[in-house]
Image: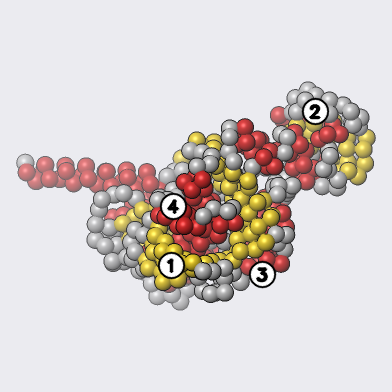
Amino acid sequence: MILKNLLEKVDIVNNCADMEMEIHGVGHDSRAIRAGELFIAIRGYESDGHDYIGSAVQQGALCVICEEAPEIAISYVQVADSRKALAAISAAWFGYPAEKLKVVGVTGTNGKTSVTNLIKHVIENCSGSKVGLIGTNGNFIGERELPTALTTPESYEMQKILDKMALEGCEYVIMEVSSHALILNRVHGIEYDVAVFTNLTPEHLDFHKTMEEYAYAKSLLFQSCRKAAINIDDPHAQIMIDNCSGTVMTYAIEDSSADLVGKDVKLYTDKTEFCMLEVGKISRVELQIPGMFSVYNALAAAAASVLLDLDIEKVTPTLFTCQGVKGRAEVLPLGMEHTVLVDYAHTPDALENIIKAVRGFAKSRVVTLFGCGGDRDKSKRPLMGKIALELSDFTVITTDNPRTEDPQAIIDDILTGTEGVNSPYKVIKDRREAICFALDGQKPGDVLILAGKGHETYQILGKKKIHFDDREVVTEHLKKKRVEKRKQVIEDLD
């Protein structure tokens, strides 16, 4: 592809390259550049692509896209924002695949994964269309999973995935859109048929600094959409509405002025029921997912479906057939007198939501096990400690993904929030030991919440990932206990 065609939608500051040159590839990692390719120098968290222009040239880069003129002799195009340039060039390279798909973007602090999966399920079952999904739990083309590393991939990888989805016959793509992706222009240039706002609670403040900045980042999604579904029970809804470039459909539980309202909510151990009110219509909705937050997720999915012109009378029964998402209020099938539930809750609001949801159906004690991630927003740690102790009958404080921080220092931050709260707890630094301790203390009717890891099958210690799955730890420990019990019975018989 010739250079000028790749730069059709790029804001150029200074051109020092032959616009008719033939480009044989595009990349932003100097180590992966090959002869005849275009290198885009972007600024990252720990490194600056401009420092690796020389390396890219040695690898055979034919031209460089940059914000600062290179210090070595090479054809280059200086741009105002190299991240936006990467997004625009990537879209052009793959033939603007988003334009071949109906794109739904879901943003918010909590609920993105559940809502995207609900929307995917509804579209597939109501229209029979093939649907792609990009999100935290994985990237999917229909039922086939693709590898993923970020909630929203870098723009080149994003466009590559969209192209693959279009080529394989997807008509829709549903994606989680993180605040990082919006601020860092990973989704720049994508026009959304529908954008969804779930909620906003403190998270990523190590990156965004303030809730105002965080809310602004989320609102960027709504500047590039044709239609939007917005939760107006959330106090940050107005900034999303004010920044919306398309028509808005609101949903809520508390605010009856919303276009779609959930009322008469009934919570059970294994399901949730409620009435969904739309102007001139009322539908009874049943979900096989427990918790009040599931009502919000279902309303978000229903609103998005209506905006996609699906029949609401087909949407509501389809919601019942959705089995939920791995690591989101996931009840492990143990067949025991107590319940173990795995949830991704890693923010104060999410932790509060899952504990309250469990409190609504638990027959006996609610025991919560959680930790906080390292190298992330420290302000939420004491808040989560306070919430866990105030809402749980017993709390086990342990590690999550400590990364490069001292695990004990993270726990100490959590403990500052427990001062003055009269509720029993235990600190066990090692997560495996902590889970085993919590399991051994379970009584009939208890519900044990393993919070924070959710779908993750690893733990980040330092800068290394080790295999770790809460589910496997539970299964292995209970199996070990059963074996020991059998041995004891045999010994007693002898």
Q: Which residue is disc 3 drawn over?
A: 238
Give the amino acid type for the residue marked by disc 1 in the picture.
Answer: Cys
Residues at badges 4 and 1 in contact (C-beta under 8 Å)? no
User: Callout 2: few (<14), some (14-19), or many (20+) C-alpha neighbours within 10 Å?
Assistant: few
Q: In this rendered view, identify the residue nearer to me: 145 or 443.
A: 145
The numbered disc on residue 229 is: none
* Amino acid type indicated by mark 4: Thr
Q: Earlier in the sequence, mark 4 or mark 3?
A: 3
Do the residues under discs 4 and 3 have CB atoms within 8 angstroms?
no
The residue under label 4 is: 318
The residue drawn where x is 31% and y is 49% is 333
Separation (CA) of disc 3 from disc 2: 43 Å
Q: SS of the residue at dot 4?
A: helix
Kind of residue at disc 2? Met
Residue with the mark numbered 1: 275
Q: Earlier in the sequence, mark 3 or mark 2?
A: 2
Which label sits in the foreground, 3 or 1?
1
| Mark 3 surroundings: few (<14), some (14-19) or many (≥20) residues within 10 A | some
Chain-order first, disc 1 or disc 2: 2
Q: Are marks 3 and 1 in contact (CB under 8 Å)?
A: no
- Marks 4 and 1, the one that precedes in the sequence: 1
In the picture, residue 172 is in which quadrant? top right
Distance (Cα) linking label 1 and label 2:
54 Å
